[in-house]
Image (cartoon, grey):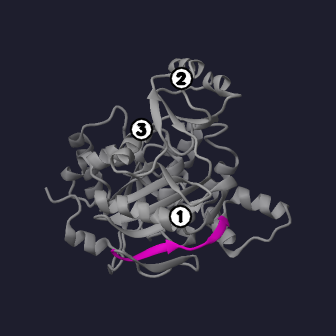
Amino acid sequence: MNAPFPHDRLASLAGGSPRPPRNILLLAQSFQAPYRVMRCAAATGAKVFLFCNDEARSLAVSRFCAGYQDFTFEPEPTPEAAATQIEAFCRKHKIDMILPADAIATRLLAGARHLLTTPVFPIPDLATFDQLVTKDRFMEFCRANAVRHPEGHILANREALIAAIKNGCIKLPAILKPINRWGSVGVVKIDAHNALEVAATIDYAPVLVQDFIEGVDRSISIFARKGAVHKQVTYCYPDAAFTFQREPELARIVGDIAANLKLDGVFNFDARIEADGTVWMIECNPRFFFTMDAAMVAGANFARVETAHGAQSHFAKVQAGPDGPIITVADGQLRQPEALLKHILRGRIPNAMDGKMLLHWLKDPVYFGLAVAGYKRRWNSRALERLLAAGKRAA
């Protein structure tokens, strides 16, 4: 079979191309982050089809889903079995590009793309993905490469954690984390006053215990090709309000990591920055990231295969980088609808980007209504999903 992303097809699908992808296949094992990926993929002008499991089928409710096919991620199919199903769908529906919408889908494609003739969106190889994807492996990577990272160690389970606290083996305050959950799920701070009480509530294993670093949280997301960064956005996300701002030292560290590992694809890094500017790397997500729809509204669509072409909004700028021009999102702020409502109720005036973010959601009214009603968080109805997605199943 051909290479996973032949150079001629990469050129024809990249930003300077006369024709971007017309049909995209999105592999999705979950629903929250993949919804953002789907919206960003649709914003390229392509029709977006889904390979999804039961958990992700609610994505078919969206008006931006052109059709879906059920696909089993667990137990994980063999690369050969996955490639056979994917290729058959791609041929039938004239798919131009395959995108993985979450970590499980990314890992699956990393192992199967050598068997595919349909181009796959740039992703890391399997060894690089596994080196970065969990918090403990990323911690080991940082130690081995002299990248500043909080000291930490792994405990087998809640009982081992409680014993370590009682024996004075944990320096407090500390941060407790699961090694493989996304975002801040399961992350909690403990101190001398609440350590045993909080430890008793931990419902995951193993437990990563890290030193607490006083400072502010920052995230940086990049799109890289062979180690060269072509897009980057740095932000924080308190209370559903995105604040974009430059962090040159963080960008330098991440640029060095990308160059050293010759990274391909989209990567999201979390960091902690002390008052004196010292940067501590925390974790890496070698996949599309949860907040990419906000980055797209601000001007940087990470679902588009491209090098820098120019600003897509007054937030996005093109600046010189060590390996060529980089699309960056400049200083500014935009709010998700819930944050915007709070902002207005406080008597404050929305900015232009707030309006664009709200319009982005209102373009998908059924899915937006379900999200506002708390669908998937407070309630769940397979029957409703099937009713709303009737007719969307790809023939």
Residue 315 at x, y percent in the picture? 58, 76
Left or right of residue 339: residue 141: left
Image vertical order of residue 230 relative to residue 282, above or below: below
Specify the segment rendered in magenta: 323-334
- Residue type beneath disc 3: Asp
Q: Is residue 191 above or below residue 148?
A: above
To which residue does mark 2 refer? 161
Q: Which mark is residue 136?
A: 3
Residue 70 visible? The answer is no
What residue is drawn where x is 58% and y is 46%? Answer: 213
Mark pair 3, 1: CA separation: 23 Å
The image quadrant of residue 29 is top left
First in sequence, mark 2 or 3: give its number: 3
- Location of residue 184 in the rendering, given as x and y in whole percent from the top left corner: 57, 43
Amino acid type indicated by mark 2: Leu
Task: For mark 3, give the secondary structure.
Answer: helix
Mark 2 to mark 3 CA distance (whole Å) = 16 Å
